[in-house]
Amino acid sequence: MRVDLATAHGLTPDWTPEVLSAERQILIPIASTFYFKVGRREAICDPNQVLMIPPGLVSRDRRLADDHVRAIIITLADDHLEELVHPGGEGLARFGDLTIPASHTVQRLAAALVRGEGEDGLTIEDAALRLLRAALGAPVARTETVGPRPLRLVAAVKEMLAQATEPLSLTRIGRTLGVSPVYLAEIFHRAEGTPIGRYQRRLRLTRALALLPETDDIAGLALDLGFSSHSHFTAAFRAAHGVTPSAYRGAPRRRTRPPRRRGPG
């Protein structure tokens, strides 16, 4: 098994050259949003999804302007992957989709791995295995099939959520995209299996996992993330992650050997 913390700088909204993935990999975005394209299939990836990359995949990606991609990439041999998840082929079958949903547990485990909660490479690998088990072992949320145009609308909504610097409303998003807010809400829920508001809140709470260890002003962070108050943020964070923001920020951070860095893809 190999665990890499990938950080891509020098961002561009243009597609990269094609890249061949020689190994099977699982990519977990950390407070990052980017596009991933395989042939004519295209997915927008953010911390609410886990990207599945089978061997032999030829892909391209592009980033949102003024953003950088930071993600955990885990490479594991097929036999070990099947042993870890489900015998009989169910684990590898998850690679039939470009992305699968990331639960709150996956997001917490990914943030903990990035923070370096461990003392050696063995501990890092153990944390990565727990992360993989959480990502691949949970049932996939049921979503409905929607057509190409609605999927483009969903991708545009995700891009707006990733770039938003102020609160967004369904009316404002719909006006920007030229559709009614009712239609937009219905299409997004059908495609993602969750309402737009809940999807956005999960993105904010996942970003909080990355930012809390670096801030001394939790109230200010809550407002920056779009929560109406410190108490609102605390209640939402505790409901999602089981601890308060202050308790999470104050958790011991031990030294560790960081995973190797490389570019995604």
Image: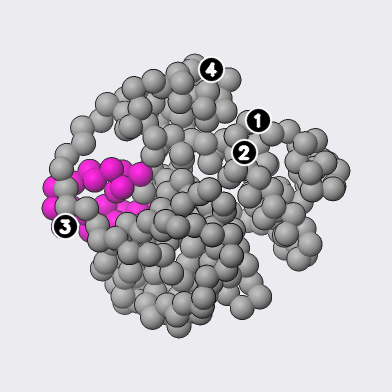
**Residue span colored magenta:** 111-134
Instruction: Report the mark closest to the observer, 3 or 1.
Output: 1
State the mark number for residue 229: 4
Q: Is the magenta region chiefly helix, strand or loop? A: helix
Q: Is residue 130 left or right of residue 199?
A: left
Mark 2 Cα-neighbour bin, 10 Å: few <14, some 14–19, many ≥20: few
Mark 3 Cα-neighbour bin, 10 Å: few <14, some 14–19, many ≥20: some
Query: Residue 136: x, y in percent?
Result: 43, 60
Mark 1 Cα-neighbour bin, 10 Å: few <14, some 14–19, many ≥20: few
| Mark 1, residue position | 167
Q: CA distance from mark 2 to mark 4?
A: 18 Å
Is the residue under label 4 in contact with that under label 1 (CB below 8 Å)?
Answer: no
Q: CA distance from mark 1 to mark 2?
A: 7 Å
> Element under label 3?
helix
Query: Which amino acid lies under the numbered mark 2 shown in the image of this protein?
Result: Ala
| Mark 3, residue position | 121
Q: CA distance from mark 3 to mark 4?
A: 40 Å
> Element under label 1?
loop
Q: Sequence order check: which comes first, mark 1 or mark 4? A: 1
Is the residue under label 4 in contact with that under label 3 (CB below 8 Å)?
Answer: no
> Element under label 4?
loop
Q: Quick one: which residue is furthest to the front in this view?
A: 10
Q: Can residue 139 be seen in the rendering of this structure?
A: no
Q: How many marks?
A: 4
> Element under label 2?
loop
| Mark 2, residue position | 164
Is the residue under label 2 in contact with that under label 1 (CB below 8 Å)?
Answer: yes
